[in-house]
Structures are given as structure tokens and as C-alpha cells.
Image: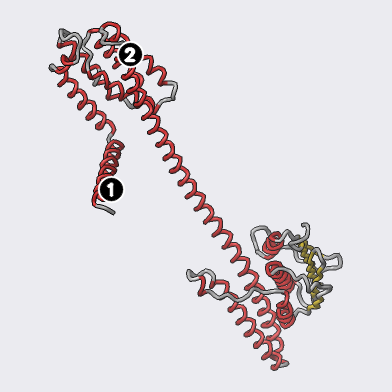
């Protein structure tokens, strides 16, 4: 970058900082700013009224008191230019009309551009028509009473000046509206982003709570069953008690490993979190074996299968968790002597899982308690599936899950 370009950039930045400070001062103390500008223009007009006005006046014999009065009438109303620009322009236009009719032709008449700018900046566009009606009489009066050359030489250039000032006000207004729209859009986007973050956090909390319920609830039920069986076996068959203790240790370690994997995804360093695969249908055998060891006899029938069209990993996890939750509930509520059956069937259009037990029909917990049935229904709904639960006519409980395949109609 050349020295000249660097100097231009530095000057531009200095001007921007100066304008920013001026706007900030105006925002903090608008009345003080208005008073300062009004007094400045009043001082300028009074300096002109001290004698300079005669250099351009067609009639230099106008009384000084009238010139001073008209000068103040063209400057002091500027204090209200932002709040009542049309009223200010009306007062100034009257003073300008007297100035033109008397032959003074005060230069302070050009201060009418200030309220014109504010009308274009803050008022509806039709207000500019009223402003034009106020600006024309002084110009026409001066052109008729004190002609200098052709009349349009006095009227047209001044009208063009007013028009350019109005266009400047419209441009500034459009820029302010555009900036305000961008700021509002950024604010709304920030609000939407915060809402999305909160919704994502709530969804993640729900997912983690569901996973923890499935993992901890099932494994604790299995451990409880094993512990009860081991306690009864300790007096009569120490070997069976040792097997129960070993199974408890194995189940506890598996539960702890799954819990660590689940909590690992909450770490800041996602790459370092454990990435063990989620359970699939192939893990059902180990699940059912653990339930059997806990004391609940389970008959497992895979039924018909479609190995060439396996379920997606997510759908397999859903089936696994539903079977796990149903067997966990059977462990908790079915009682002694109960048996369970797990039947899986696959077709070209859907996959079904039916879990039944022969224990007593235990009603679901009241609303707000427990996550089991709610979690199963939420999992099924994610894949457009359905879940049916209820008591059996002959006693016991059933859970029926239906998951349509993703490439088949729901």
C-alpha cells in the first residue's frame, strides 16, 4: 500500500471516529446538542445582519431591526427541527417571505434546508409536498417584486438545492432503516440460536436420561435377582452362591462400562470420549442370558428373518432397548414362578418384537413416575413405529413393538 493510500485510509478512519463520537454525544444529550447548533446558526445570522446582508440585498434600506428580527426568525426555530420539522419550516417560511417581500433577501433563508432534511428523514414522503408549498411563495415573491434577469434564475437553482437536500434525507433514512433491519435480524437470529441450543440441550438430557434408565435399571434388576438367588443358595449350595456372585460382578462391570461410555460423550473433548458400538440384535443373546441368570426363565425365538435386509443400527437399538425394558419390568414385577417369552419376526415391510410374561398384570406407574414405558414409546415413535402394552387375558403382561422398514410406507 502506498503512502498516499495509507494517509487516505487514516483520514477516513479519523472522520468515522469523529462522526461516531458526535452521534454518541447527540444520543446522550440531544437537547444540549440542539441548543448548541441553534445558537451557532443564530450567531452566524446575526453576524450577517450586522451589515453583510446589504451585499446581496436588492433594497439595502431595509431597517436594521427588521433584519435582526428576520435573522432570529430564520435561526431560533431550528431548536425544534427534529421534533416538529414541518412547524419549524412554516415559521421560517413566513420569515423568508417577509425577507423576500422587503428586498432584504437574507442569506439565512437557506437554513430552511435543515427542516427540509429532517422532514425527508423522519416524516412520510407526502409531507414533502407540504414543504414544497411552503418554500415556493418566498421564491416567487422575490422573483416577481425584485426581478434579476429571468425569473427562473432565482427560483429553479434554489428549488434544485432543496430537492437535493430532500434526496439526501431520503438516502440517510433508507440507510438507517436498512441498518435497523439488520440489527433486528441479528437479534432475532441470536434469540433463535439460543432457543435451538436450549432445545438441543433438553433433547440431549432426555436422551441421556432414557439411556441411563435403560442401562442402570436393567442391570440393577439383574443384580438384584442374582443377589436374591445367591442369598437363598448360600445355605444349601455354596457353589451356586459363588456363581451368583461372579455373575453379579460381571453384570456390574458391564453396567459400569456402559455408563462410562454414555458419560464419556459429555466430555469437552469429543474425540477422546469412548466410542463403543451401541447394542444390536446380535447382543440379545447375552441380554437374555443375563436375565435367565437373574432367575427369570426366558424363551427366545427369532422367528423368520431377512438377513439380506437387516434393520438399521438405530432400529436395532430400539428393538434391543424395548426388549431390555420389558424383561426388566418382568424381573421387577412378575414375581416367583413367572416365565417370559421373546419373539422377533421380520418381513419385507416391518419388524416386530413381542415380549410376554406369565406373572401378574401390574399397572403402569402413575404419570410423572418412571421412564420405562415413556422411553419405549419415544423410541418407537422415532422410527414411525407403534408400541402396545397391557395385561393378558390369562394373566401376565405383553409388550408389542412394530417398526416399519425405512424404505416401506409407514
Which element type, helix, strand or loop, lies under badge 2? helix
On screen, 409 above or below 337? above
In the image, residue 54 lies at what x, y percent?
A: 16, 14
On screen, 186 above or below 256? above
On screen, 320 above or below 409? below
Say whether residue 125 is visible.
yes
Which disc number belongs to residue 9?
A: 1
Tell me if 53 is positioned left or right of 22 in this view.
left
Give the residue at x 84% y 73%.
Answer: 304
Gap in angstroms between the C-alphas marked 2 and 1 = 43 Å
> Residue furthest toward the right?
394
Which disc number belongs to residue 152?
A: 2
Give the residue at x 74% y 69%.
Answer: 311
Answer with mark 2 or mark 1, whichever residue precedes in sequence: 1
In the image, residue 366 lies at what x, y percent?
A: 68, 59
Give the residue at x 86% y 68%.
Answer: 394
On screen, 382 above or below 122? below
Q: Residues within 10 Å of mark 1 (few under 14, many from 20)?
A: few
The label nearer to you, 2 versus 1, is: 2
Q: Residues within 10 Å of mark 2 (few under 14, many from 20)?
A: some
In the image, residue 319 lies at what x, y percent?
A: 73, 69
> Dividing the picture into quarters, in which one does residue 119 lie?
top left
Looking at the image, do the residues carrying marks 2 and 1 touch, with CB atoms under 8 Å apart?
Answer: no
Which disc number belongs to residue 266?
A: none
Amino acid at each position: 500500500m502506498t503512502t498516499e493510500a495509507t494517509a487516505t485510509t487514516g483520514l477516513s478512519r479519523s472522520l468515522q471516529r469523529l462522526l461516531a463520537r458526535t452521534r454518541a454525544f447527540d444520543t446522550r444529550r440531544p437537547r444540549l446538542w440542539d441548543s448548541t447548533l441553534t445558537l451557532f446558526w443564530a450567531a452566524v445570522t446575526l453576524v450577517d445582519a450586522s451589515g453583510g446582508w446589504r451585499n446581496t440585498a436588492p433594497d439595502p434600506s431595509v431597517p436594521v431591526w427588521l433584519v435582526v428580527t428576520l435573522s432570529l426568525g430564520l435561526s431560533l426555530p431550528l431548536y425544534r427541527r427534529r421534533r416538529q420539522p414541518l412547524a419549524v419550516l412554516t415559521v421560517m417560511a413566513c420569515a423568508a417571505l417577509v425577507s423576500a417581500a422587503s428586498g432584504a433577501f437574507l442569506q439565512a433563508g437557506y437554513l430552511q434546508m435543515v427542516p427540509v432534511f429532517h422532514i425527508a428523514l423522519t416524516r412520510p414522503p407526502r409531507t414533502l409536498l407540504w414543504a414544497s408549498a411552503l418554500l415556493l411563495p418566498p421564491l416567487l415573491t422575490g422573483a416577481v417584486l425584485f426581478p434579476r434577469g429571468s425569473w427562473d434564475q432565482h427560483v429553479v437553482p434554489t428549488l434544485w438545492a432543496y430537492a437535493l437536500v430532500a434526496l439526501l434525507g431520503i438516502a440517510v433514512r433508507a440507510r438507517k432503516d436498512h441498518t435497523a433491519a439488520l440489527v433486528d435480524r441479528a437479534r432475532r437470529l441470536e434469540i433463535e440460536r439460543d432457543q435451538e441450543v436450549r432445545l438441543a440441550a433438553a433433547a440431549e438430557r432426555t436422551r441421556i436420561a432414557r439411556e441411563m434408565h435403560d442401562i442402570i435399571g436393567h442391570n440393577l434388576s439383574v443384580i438384584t435377582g442374582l443377589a436374591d438367588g445367591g442369598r437363598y443358595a448360600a445355605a444349601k449350595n455354596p457353589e451356586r452362591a459363588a456363581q451368583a456372585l461372579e455373575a453379579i460382578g460381571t453384570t456390574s462391570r458391564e453396567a459400569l462400562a456402559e455408563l462410562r461410555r454414555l458419560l464419556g460423550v459429555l466430555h469437552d473433548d469429543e474425540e477422546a470420549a469412548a466410542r463403543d458400538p451401541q447394542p444390536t440384535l446380535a447382543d440379545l443373546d447375552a441380554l437374555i442370558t443375563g436375565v435367565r441368570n437373574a432367575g427369570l426363565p426366558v424363551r427366545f425365538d427369532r422367528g423368520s428373518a431377512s438377513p439380506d435386509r437387516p434393520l438399521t443400527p438405530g432400529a436395532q437399538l430400539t428393538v434391543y432397548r424395548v426388549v431390555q425394558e420389558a424383561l426388566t419390568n418382568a424381573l421387577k414385577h412378575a414375581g416367583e414362578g413367572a416365565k417370559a417369552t421373546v419373539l422377533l419376526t421380520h418381513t419385507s415391510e416391518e419388524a416386530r418384537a413381542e415380549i410376554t410374561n406369565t406373572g401378574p398384570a401390574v399397572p403402569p406407574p402413575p404419570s410423572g413416575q418412571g421412564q420405562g414405558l415413556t422411553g419405549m414409546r419415544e423410541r418407537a415413535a422415532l422410527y414411525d413405529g407403534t408400541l402396545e402394552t397391557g395385561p393378558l387375558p390369562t394373566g401376565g403382561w405383553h409388550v408389542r413393538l412394530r417398526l416399519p422398514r425405512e424404505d416401506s410406507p409407514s
